[in-house]
Image (cartoon, helix red, strand yellow):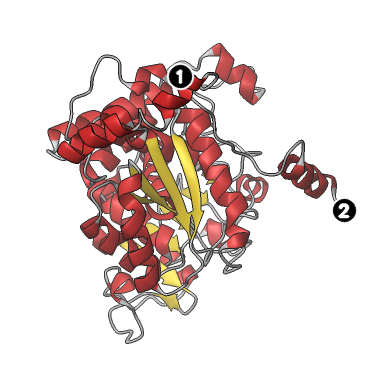
Amino acid sequence: MSDLRKQALDYHAFPQPGKISMTVTKPSETIEDLALAYSPGVAEPVREIAEDSEAVFKYTNKGNTVAVISNGTAILGLGNLGAMASKPVMEGKSLLFKRFANIDSFDIEVNNEDPKAFIETVANIADSFGGINLEDIKAPECFEIEKALIERCKVPVFHDDQHGTAIVTAAGMLNALEIQGKDLAHAKIVCLGAGAAAIACMQLLITCGAQRENIYMLDRKGVIHTRRDDLNEYKQMFANNTDKRTLQDVLFEADVFVGVSGPNLLSADDLKLMAKNPIVFACSNPDPEITPELALQTRDDVIVATGRSDYPNQVNNVLCFPFIFRGALDVRAKEINNAMKVAAVHAIRQIAKQPVPTEVLQACGEKALTFGKDYIIPKPMDPRLLTEVATAVAQAAIDSGVAQGQLAKNTRIRAA
């Protein structure tokens, strides 16, 4: 057994199984405490909530809870391994919610692959929580599921594999383009992969200013173009009117490569086809489409990002999802809309331009970090992500009319 495998298994097994547990927040030592916590005292908040449903936010933990829900059909890069196999990942997500944004999170694994049954299950329990984080659900079903739940649920619903990836990708991409002296509106973008993350990334880049006709998306059959008759409605949105058919065809003079596909699919010769000062986001995990070593050995003018923590410029969803929900919960947003996503993009990218606090350098084992080719995205341990990203998201919710409350001075954004 490898050292990493043993360490990971021991980490999850000892000193007790799993990564999360529940904490009691009120006194429960005396008979009087129990009389208030349960019968007969609990009847009083029940009556209050029955008269005014909004009172649930005053008397329960609903306003600071997120359910992390999966059916295990697309677990990390491991595929469809079933609902129970997804539980370590969902527990991990709950750990990150608590660690980075002080959000109480509960993992829920739904043992049903039928989208309609999954939708019914989640919709029926959604009101118990302040928000729903969907995770590790395969495409294209994930699009149908998220759309239906957004329409049916009264709380914000967010598929992190789509939108969390897209937000962090867009933040890093805008900074990389700035460093390389390019702009998004004129960039030629190649996206290798056409699943949930790829489609969400390209959609958000368009929202941020990319031109749809400048985007070339590829699936296992090659370039997605207008003369193909095998495209689902989501791929169809990125069908380019082009005679180009292969990865090499579209890489010629491309400014940006985004990989959400598989390992070692971008060769050194492929990279040589790209325009001057190219940008490569090789985000396949654990093995990227091209290693940073090979990319930098091939071209010294390239900026490289991956999904891995052992290389610079990690595209990591933890830079986003805890703070998106923190901001949404604190103003009781009805949904997480494009305005909130774009606000998160710009807040994240601006943090990378600021001086890095000493505690972040120490946590990352770095002597210095300065905005540039090797530092286009903040580190996950940066405490400014909570205050700046969550506040920007909350304000965008207010400004776009989806907030049901104001950003109070005692908000958990500052208390987390």
For this rendering, which residue is in front, 147 or 212? 147
What's the residue type where badge 2 is placed? Met
Find the distance from the CA under tag 2 to the CA under tag 1: 53 Å
Q: Is residue 57 left or right of residue 81?
A: left
Residue depicted at 73% across the width and 39% down the height: 16
Quadrant for residue 8, please give it: top right
**Residue 172 percent location from the top left of the image:** 42, 39
**Residue 114 visible at all:** yes
Residue depicted at 58% across the width and 43% down the height: 92
**Residue 367 percent location from the top left of the image:** 64, 17
For this rendering, which residue is in front, 73 or 306? 73
What element does badge 1 sit on? helix
- Identify the residue position indicated by label 1 in the image: 32
- Identify the residue position indicated by label 2 in the image: 1
Judge the density around disc 1: few (<14), some (14-19), many (≥20) Cα neighbours within 10 Å.
Answer: few
Residue depicted at 84% across the width and 45% down the height: 3
What's the residue type where badge 1 is placed? Glu
What element does badge 2 sit on? loop
**Residue 6 percent location from the top left of the image:** 82, 47
Q: Is residue 100 left or right of residue 334?
A: right
Judge the density around disc 2: few (<14), some (14-19), many (≥20) Cα neighbours within 10 Å.
Answer: few
Q: Earlier in the sequence, mark 2 or mark 1?
A: 2
